[in-house]
Image (cartoon, rainbow, N blue to C red):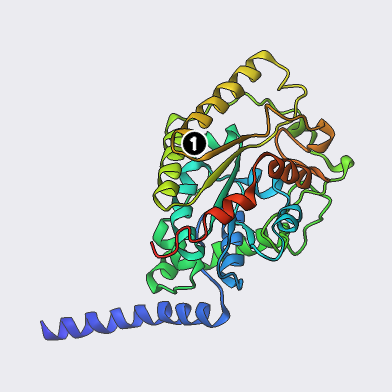
Amino acid sequence: MKTYLKKFGLFALMGAIPLVGLYLLLNMTGIKPLLTDSVSFDYKADLVAQSNLDKVDVLCVGSSIALNNIGSRAMQEYLGKDYTYYNFSSWGLTMQDLNIMLPVLLEKYQPKVVLIASGPMDFEKQKVGMCTKEEFSWYINNERRPYFYFKNSDLYSLVQRKRTRNKYTKFARPEMRIHLLMDEWGGSNLVTKKENFQWFRYDENLIKETEDYQYDELQKLCEYSTSQSTPLIFIASPMKKKPNCEDEACRQFIQKHTQRTREIVEANGQIFVDMHSNHTYADSLFCDESHLVYGGPDSLSNDILKEISLKSILEANPNATAGK
């Protein structure tokens, strides 16, 4: 029996050595495990983990709608030197995903205001194979948990992810519609040339199926922000009018969605800003149904700031999540 246990212990030790070696190698080289199956989400999380961000006064979060449509420069110029701004958004996130991110971000950065720019596509079925709250926290706080590395660090996937990431960053062409070229505030302006438009997306049908549970997730987001005394500003982002938004069925779909989200946000004492129904943005400022290009993002940010007195909200909420 003792001989068997010795042999078993020896084999276990031999099997553990490569794993320990892999962990040490990844640690020394700064390579992190895959957090999710989204190159966009993991890239943004990596940027955040490597940044010198301390506290963020105005925190923007959401899908590509928030990532691409909120103009960083216009936002920071408005805020000036007194307040900081950062956009934590990435592709394909839904309300369910934001409920994983927001508690971690509020704890780490103690924002005074949270912005969510959104459209009906953020209420569809979950698109990203998401991590847990704990894993997201470990990742952006650079807490290196060995078993997390072993679970998410197969070499083939790491190599494939690096290639994909380089395609959208290192080797990306800024005039193309799909890239991850982030500005210093975490945003990404799709400066798309007309000849490179993805025309099949430009005329995409806006009528989609939203999921009831995603509205429940918005309810949770609002309740959590309220519990943390953090104002949440939910922005219904503008969408291209032709050909779909002029269709009666599409108008009714968006109107119903807008009303439903407004009721949830305002019932929780938070702020709803309708930038779709109340404003007209030329279709030439869109590269598809919902993503602004050229000067569109800065125009949207400036129009949002005309609708709300963001500085007044900031001044009225000096502590936000601090001490909670």
Please, which residue is most extreme toward the top here? 248
Q: Is residue 94 above or below residue 60?
A: above
Residue 90 at least partly seen: no
Left or right of 21 in this view: 247? right
- What residue is rendered at 69% in x and 55% in y? 187
Left or right of 244 in this view: 157? left
Q: Position of residue 137 (x, y in %)?
A: 45, 64
Residue 116's image quarter? top right
- What residue is rendered at 47% in x and 78% in y? 22
Residue under circle 1? Answer: 265
Q: Nearer the viewer, residue 186 or 77?
A: 77
Q: Could you tell me which secondary element the residue under label 1 belongs to?
A: helix
Residue 234's image quarter? top right
Q: Is residue 76 above or below residue 21?
A: above
Q: Position of residue 303 (x, y in %)?
A: 73, 40
Q: Is residue 243 above or below residue 130?
A: above
